Image (spheres, rainbow, N blue to C red):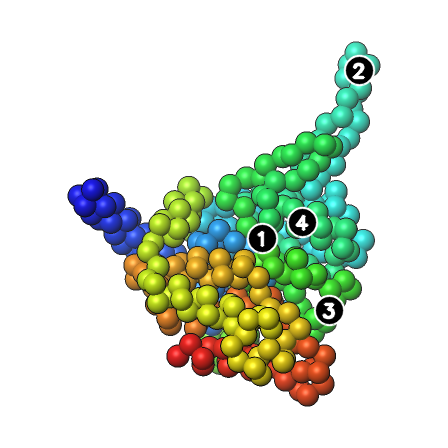
Amino acid sequence: MGDVLGGQAAEILAEAEAMADRLARLRAAIGRIIFGQEAVIDQVLITLLSGGHVLLVGVPGLGKTKLVETLGTVLGLDERRVQFTPDLMPADILGSEVLEEDAHGRRSFRFIKGPVFCQLLMADEINRASPRTQSALLQAMQEKRVAVGGQLLALPEPFHVLATQNPIEQEGTYPLPEAQLDRFLLEVDVQYPDEAAERAMLLATTGAEEVRAEPVLSPQELIAAQRLIRRLPVPEGVLDAILRLVRGARPETAALPAVAQHLAYGPGPRAAQALMLATRARALLQGRLAPSLDDVLALADPVLRHRMALSFSARAEGVKLPEVIAALKAALA
């Protein structure tokens, strides 16, 4: 039995080392196209390696669409983009049935697949879609299949949604419901690049020739990386930290009285699952074979902030959600 376990550990070690090298080349390839957004790139890659979906929050013009296009190229994924508007219907995303007549006069329905039948879907300004349309996308995100005409149709593998939301109109036309937000593994805050990165971007994107992305990984290699992530060991101390952080962010089980008083609701078990996967992915992305407490602290904000809400009294007192998360992180140290 010991020889078998030792052989499995050696196999995982070899796979992890080889994958870490590929991921380093992947990050470098994306960094040649997207400037000054290293943290954003890492968090998006962590989401994809974890098999999840990501919500990008940032003002227009920060390269969110360019990032999705670049990811589609470097990962060899079939990517599509949908501009969400209030009049967008579920059929505009899922597809629709059309009535056709053949040469003999026989009529039949044929299903025409919508843009959701891809491997990387960019949902631009997702909070502008109606609740009905959001519900259609919700099934695709959760089950990775859609129900059309009484039949369940599987989506391609892998399937990921990269959605954008503009903080200038944070609520948009239709606020994203809690169930929709919970389906996003991470909420990534996209900030302005620093001066050096913006200078490099200007020189690289306004010349006669522009650097183009090249394939680095295949979809099959991405799926293999996702399976490897689930096999990486998680130390007992990291598991305990994840449980303490997530359970401490719920008013019912919060260890800090101030946290319990400030929250209307907290994250569910899906947040703990997201942290378990994301900490492993972050460790592998940095060339490590097991996550640490630093990974939990680094990913606490993007995992928790869209799964928590302040109470009315806390908002009236001027309490900010990042302050609550900072208190939770400080309690782990």
> Dots 4 and 3: beta carbons under 8 Å?
no
Give the CA distance from mark 4 to mark 3.
18 Å
Between residue 298 and residue 202, name the one nearer to us.
298
Between residue 84 and residue 230, name the one nearer to us.
230
Return the residue found at the far bottom: 317
Mark 2 residue element: loop
Give the amino acid at mark 1.
Val
Residue 303 visible in the shown view: yes
Give the CA distance from mark 4 to mark 1.
9 Å
Give the amino acid at mark 4.
Leu
Quarter of the picture containing the C terminus is: bottom left
- Residue 106 circle label: 2
Q: Nearer the viewer, mark 1 or mark 2?
A: 1
Return the residue found at the far top: 104
Whichever of labels 1 and 2 marks the residue nearer the N terminus, that label is 2
Residue in view at x 63 percent, y 34 percent: 153
Mark 4 residue element: helix
Q: In the visual, does 285 lie left or right of 302?
A: left
Give the amino acid at mark 2.
Arg
- Residue 171 circle label: 3
Mark 3 residue element: loop
41 vs 329: above or below: above
